[in-house]
């Protein structure tokens, strides 16, 4: 999964806009544009994505067309991340179950094993504590 999103713009991201313009940008680095809507006088608005050298290009330039000329995949790391966002709830559930299993093992594991993997346990517990704090 990491390969699929390598090159995606690091978050956090936020939406900005007005009645005339909309864009998705970072909350850091001076609000680096990720995606925007190009409004042109005569034609329909066009979605644009940022290239690695910070140039905004029309989404169609990253598209992989099928035999009918329609595109079914956008070859851009931020576009892949947006398209796969629906998977996040299931990933969070899986991660919570894995952490619960780790905690259960920690209760019965020999001390030598816990010492060997202490950093992983501490990281999982720290993440859980931060998440619990954020939910309050």
Image (spheres, rainbow, N blue to C red):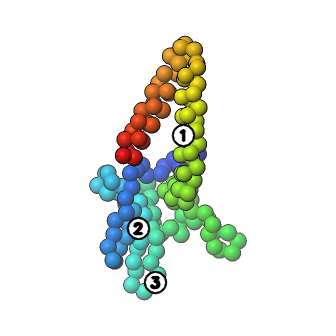
Compared to residue 8, the image places residue 39 above or below, namely below
Q: Which residue corresponds to mark 2?
A: 36
The image shows residue 68 at horizontal and vertical percentages of: 69, 75
- If you read the primary sequence from the N terminus, does the residue marked by circle 3 or circle 1 appear first? 3
- Between marks 3 and 1 in the image, the one whose residue lies nearer the viewer: 1
Q: Which residue corresponds to mark 3?
A: 43
Which residue sits at x=37%, y=63%? 15
Q: CA distance from mark 2 to mark 1?
A: 34 Å
Which residue sits at x=41%, y=74%? 38
Give the class, few, some or many, for how many residues have Cα within 10 Å of label 1's Cα (few <14, many ≥20). some
Q: Does dot 2 land on a helix, a strand or a loop? A: strand
Which residue sits at x=50%, y=67%? 59
Q: Is residue 76 visible to us here?
A: no
- If you read the primary sequence from the N terminus, does the residue marked by circle 2 or circle 1 appear first? 2
| Viewer-closest of 59 and 81 | 81
Q: CA distance from mark 3 to mark 1?
A: 47 Å
| Viewer-closest of 23 and 66 | 23
Q: Which residue corresponds to mark 1?
A: 96
Q: CA distance from mark 2 to mark 3?
A: 16 Å
- Between marks 2 and 1 in the image, the one whose residue lies nearer the viewer: 1
Q: Is residue 125 visible to us here?
A: yes
Image quarter for residue 70?
A: bottom right
10 on left or right of 74: left
Give the class, few, some or many, for how many residues have Cα within 10 Å of label 3's Cα (few <14, many ≥20). few
The image shows residue 104 at horizontal and vertical percentages of: 57, 27
- Between marks 2 and 3 in the image, the one whose residue lies nearer the viewer: 2
Compared to residue 31, the image places residue 45 above or below, namely below
């Amino acid at each position: 999964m990491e390969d699929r999103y390598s090159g995606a713009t690091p978050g956090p991201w936020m939406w900005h806009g007005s009645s005339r313009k909309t864009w998705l940008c970072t909350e850091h680095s001076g609000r680096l544009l990720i995606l925007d809507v190009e409004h042109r006088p005569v034609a329909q608005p066009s979605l644009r994505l940022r290239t690695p050298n910070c140039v905004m290009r029309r989404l169609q330039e990253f598209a992989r067309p099928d035999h009918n000329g329609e595109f079914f995949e956008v070859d851009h790391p931020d576009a892949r991340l947006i398209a796969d966002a629906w998977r996040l709830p299931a990933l969070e559930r899986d991660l919570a179950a894995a952490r619960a299993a780790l905690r259960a093992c920690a209760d019965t594991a020999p001390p030598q094993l816990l010492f060997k993997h202490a950093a992983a346990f501490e990281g999982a517990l720290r993440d859980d504590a931060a998440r619990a704090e954020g939910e309050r």
